[in-house]
Amino acid sequence: MTLHSTNPEGRKPVIRCAACPIADRAVCSYSTTRELSLLEAIKSYRTYLPGEEIQSTGEAAAHVGSVVEGIVSLSRLMPDGRRQMVGLLFPGDFLGRATRDTAPYDAIAVGQVTLCQFDRRRFEKMLGDSPALNRRLLDMTLDELDAAREWMVLLGRKTAREKIASFIALTARRSRAPVSADGLHIALPLTREAMADYLGLTIETVSRQIGALKRDGLIILTDARHLVIPDLDALSAEAGDDVV
Amino acid sequence: MTLHSTNPEGRKPVIRCAACPIADRAVCSYSTTRELSLLEAIKSYRTYLPGEEIQSTGEAAAHVGSVVEGIVSLSRLMPDGRRQMVGLLFPGDFLGRATRDTAPYDAIAVGQVTLCQFDRRRFEKMLGDSPALNRRLLDMTLDELDAAREWMVLLGRKTAREKIASFIALTARRSRAPVSADGLHIALPLTREAMADYLGLTIETVSRQIGALKRDGLIILTDARHLVIPDLDALSAEAGDDVV
DNA sequence: CGGTTGAGTTGATCTGAGTCAAACACTCCA
DNA sequence: TGGAGTGTTTGACTCAGATCAACTCAACCG
């Protein structure tokens, strides 16, 4: 990851953090260099282990930040133990809610996770006088809202098969996997349990529906966490969405 | 609704639109008077009839605005006719996505609706140089995101009874209804069909579960759309949430 | 090696909510 | 006064997905 590089003209140093859309000049093109310097000053990196809790329900967060590497799950635990995932953050996604102290859900590292963190207090102070940063955050929040609503349709109206097909198709689109002759090779980033929590199902149903898709030739399992999609369009058709 | 009134000192005219959090100086206290004047210039009111489509999927919206009166539902229609509501906007909520042309769902008036609208193009232009407006919009979007995530838990993990109890409790909290001796008198703003679409159920199940809550004495139906809640805490306990 | 542990699969059974069908209760209008 | 139309309730039946319970498989380790 390039943190400091030289700009095309080879003069002024440009702050860069390729995977962090907040502090990356290339992505956040309307930020001024001064703002990026300020961000740089309050930036730090931290790595979390698989399963580690990054932030828990109700706890005041000291940092906000971007996911640089790995996946973070946001989930809510009901008092009796039922769990529902409410978001999955991939590299480039923003974690933490500017202007709010606490979040009503747990953020947990799925696999190993690297965050590009900013001190929350100072980040919020910057927010007060940076329209560009505000704008960027608004855009990202709107994207999350869209994703959440898409997921509401899945949770409320889709069958188990459609849910699994949607999830696999989503994963395939997220992972910029190369297309080889026999199809798209992808890895499932979640355990069966996490998939169940994301899709509002049980592990057994997840397992059975993956089995069904396999039997129908829509996916080919190499092992429990790796599969090949011979025809992504055919799989997407099983997801019940509009063809766009 | 007072659009122009006099401020406490009785000198300068203050722009006011009590139910519109965007153009209401009292609510949006960090906006400058100048910004409010600009907003005032691009503001208009429009009334929609019950069931009228305010905006439909994929169609470019000419306006964004606040709900002043009535309720607006946001819903997504699957190709085979299944419908899932993804949001309910009450007075004070913002409709339309600044910075985005189209929305991937339908906005439909539930009952009669009055909107306080702003020309989208010009509103977005203002957004470019008003940190206060940006900030306000970010706050509202975060609220919507929270609500959406809360709803994901309901859709993914709650039973039909818990869904109905959640919805009635939510409605009770939203409606600033007076508490009389026998309990809280509230009106259900939605038809059984709309409730079903919101909760990810069928009308029959909605009807049966309302019947069950009635039989258990948690609610008293005066007619299909009006009920009394003798004990809101008892009802909320049926909703399956943490007691906060 | 054998033993343990955690993830995943598979089978038998149960049940909550969906489906289908009918009846009821309104309001609106002719 | 009597449909026509819309929203709501109720009943009988079905089925998708949950539950409960084994069982497989691989990784890890003393």
Image (cartoon, coloured by chain):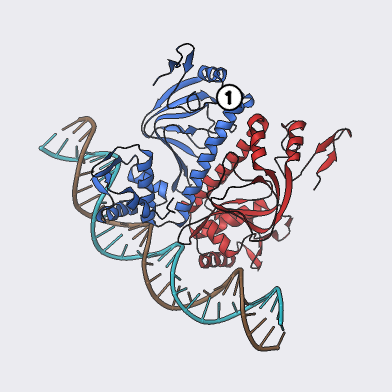
Chain colours: A red, B blue, C brown, D cyan
Q: Which amino acid does label 1 sit on?
A: Arg
Front-lying residue, A34 or B122: A34
Q: Name the residue under label 1.
A: B121
Q: Which chain carries label 1?
A: B
Other-residue count near label 1 (Cα within 10 Å), few / some / many at <14 / 14–19 / ≥20: some
Instruction: Choose top left, top right, bottom left or bottom right for residue C3.
Output: bottom right
- Horizontal side of B199 relative to A161 (left or right) equals left
x, y percent for residue B31? 55, 24
Q: Can residue A157 be seen in this view?
A: no
- Horizontal side of A106 relative to C2 (left or right) equals left
Q: Would you place residue B47 above or below residue B158 in this image?
A: above
Q: Would you place residue B39 above or below residue A76 in this image?
A: above
x, y percent for residue B90? 42, 35
x, y percent for residue B152? 49, 50
- Horizontal side of A118 relative to B241 (left or right) equals right
Front-lying residue, A173 or A28: A28
Instruction: Quarter of the image for the C terminus of chain A: give it.
Output: top right
User: Label 1's element?
Assistant: helix
Front-lying residue, D30 or A213: D30
